[in-house]
Amino acid sequence: MTIGHRKPQKQLKHLVFQVQRMRIITQEIGRLKENELLATTILSASPQADGEKPVMTGKADLTGSQESTTQVLLTRAIARVDLNIADDADIQINRISMDNIHCEAFLLPQNPVSSPSGAALAKIDTTFNTPLKPGEYAGLVHLYEQVGDGIPVELHGTLEGDPVTLSLALPNTIHRNHIYKIKLFSGDSSNL
């Protein structure tokens, strides 16, 4: 933070407040035992995770380290679903729906991937203001890492002018920091 020559006292108070707030958060995390920290979950009222401001986590082993600093690689705690409609496909997508979406996930990666027991399941049902035409659409949906019985996906739109619903399923395990691409080709085949 840069403290300018105008109203530096107000900026300094803000900086001190932010530092104090970070100390409180750090102290709270520092009181948790490892198993409690690993059991910490993130929860959303919406089944779609926030792709604009994703939670990011990282891990560093400091055992025996004498260094005063260390680098930590941060990864997103969410997965991204993209859509790619082939240029020669005469298809437009008006709506996407997904079932069995977890609204809660573990803050830190689990090995193997798992979902919190009793995590609420919800449905994503998004209608697009402008139909999606041939092209690539990144970040159509963002999901928390989860394990389940697959995520049914339905793409609603038109194929050669006629109404169509294309059905497929995402894998049983959705991994954090991964991109899942749905590719639509000309004809009636879809590929995930």
Image (cartoon, rainbow, N blue to C red):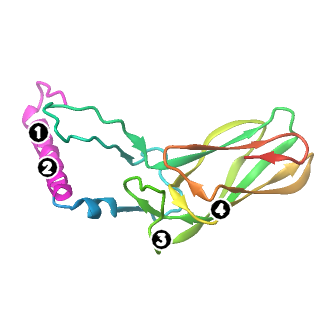
* Front-lying residue, 55 or 162: 55
Question: Residues under labels 2 and 1: Cα distance?
Answer: 20 Å
Of badges 4 and 3, the one in the foreground is 4
Residue depicted at 9% across the width and 32% down the height: 8
Q: Count residues near mark 4 (Cα–Cα under 10 Å), then give few for <14, some for 14-19, many for 20+.
A: some
Going from the N terminus, do you reach mark 1 or mark 4 first? 1
Identify the residue position indicated by label 1 in the image.
10
Identify the residue position indicated by label 3 in the image.
119
Q: Which residues are magenta?
A: 1-30
Going from the N terminus, do you reach mark 2 or mark 1 first? 1
Question: Residues under labels 4 and 3: Cα distance?
Answer: 15 Å
Identify the residue position indicated by label 2 in the image.
23
Tell me if 50 is positioned left or right of 124 in this view: left
Instruction: Locate residue 167: give its quadrant.
Output: bottom right
Residue depicted at 56% across the width and 54% down the height: 174
Going from the N terminus, do you reach mark 4 or mark 3 first? 3
Of badges 1 and 4, the one in the foreground is 4
On whether residue 77 falls in the magenta region, the answer is no
Say which quadrant the N terminus sits in: top left
Q: Count residues near mark 2 (Cα–Cα under 10 Å), then give few for <14, some for 14-19, many for 20+.
A: few
In the rendered structure, which amino acid carries the disc numbered 3?
Answer: Ala
Of badges 3 and 1, the one in the foreground is 3
Question: Where is residue 131 shown, x and y percent of the image?
Answer: 75, 46
Residue 150 disc label: 4
